[in-house]
Amino acid sequence: MTPRALLLLLPLLLAGCTTSRQPSSPSPASPSASPASAAPCRPVVRTDALPTWARAGFTGDGDGIPYVMSRAGDILGVLFGTPLNAPPAPDHNNKILWVSHAPVSGGDLLITAKRDGTTDTVERKVTGGPGPSIVDLPEAGCWRLTLRWSGHTDTMDLLYARPGSAGVTR
């Protein structure tokens, strides 16, 4: 292919690689109609260094510790009970440490979890707001969590597997 032909094809190739950012927090009037809840459920468990604001109580930068960042980056969940299991595994809890980047002014952390591809919705509460918790969900699958605390709302996706299974079906 000639350099000129490649230059003509480049804009077409790049057009297929663009993405658009969706608003990250659901509308108060209709959480289920928000663009964030319409996006596919895709949990991203990270093990790189924790953000600076989330390192209190950890040795070093927290590199290697599994965590999931919320869509807007206002809260993260450090996953101490990995993998997360539904039903809960007999050998470990579904322990999540919630760390808020947004200011916390008291109150509870309210979690509304919806299982991808279903109408299954459950609610959980972390008394006292972001902090240590055990979050058990009723079925294996990808769950979209809407998190509400101290006047903030954010979402994240978490995967719950069947104990002892390598994969999850929806």
Image (cartoon, grey):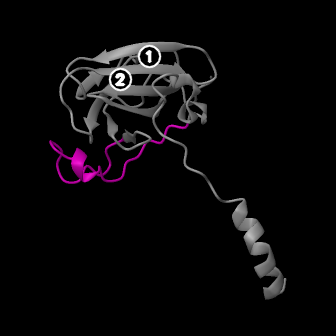
Q: Is residue 35 left or right of residue 157?
A: right
Q: Which residues are magenta?
A: 42-66
Q: Are marks 2 and 1 in contact (CB under 8 Å)?
A: yes
Quadrant of the snapshot with the N terminus = bottom right
Looking at the image, residue 113 lies above or below residue 35: above
Q: Position of residue 91 (x, y in %)?
A: 34, 20
Q: Which residue is mark 1?
A: 137
Q: Residue at x 23, y 17 (%)?
A: 127
- Spatial separation of the CA atoms under disc 2 and disc 1: 9 Å
- The reply to whether residue 138 is visible in this rendering is no
Q: Is residue 37 left or right of residue 134?
A: right
Q: Residue at x 59, y 51 (%)?
A: 20
- Confirm whether the magenta stretch covers residue 141: no
Q: Tag on residue 47?
A: none
Q: Tag on residue 94?
A: 2
Q: Position of residue 105 (x, y in %)?
A: 18, 29
Towards the viewer: 23 or 132: 23
Q: Position of residue 163 (x, y in %)?
A: 47, 21
Q: Residue at x 62, y 17 (%)?
A: 118
User: What secondary structure characterizes most of the magenta part?
Assistant: loop
Kind of residue at disc 2? Asn
Element assignment for label 2: loop
Towards the viewer: 170 or 106: 106
Considering only order in the chain, which callout, 1 or 2, is on the residue closer to the N terminus? 2
Q: Position of residue 69 (x, y in %)?
A: 39, 42
Towards the viewer: 49 or 74: 74
Towards the viewer: 93 or 165: 93
User: Crowdedness of circle 1 by 10 Å Cα count: few (<14), some, many (20+)?
Assistant: many
Q: Is residue 56 left or right of residue 114?
A: left
Kind of residue at disc 1? Leu
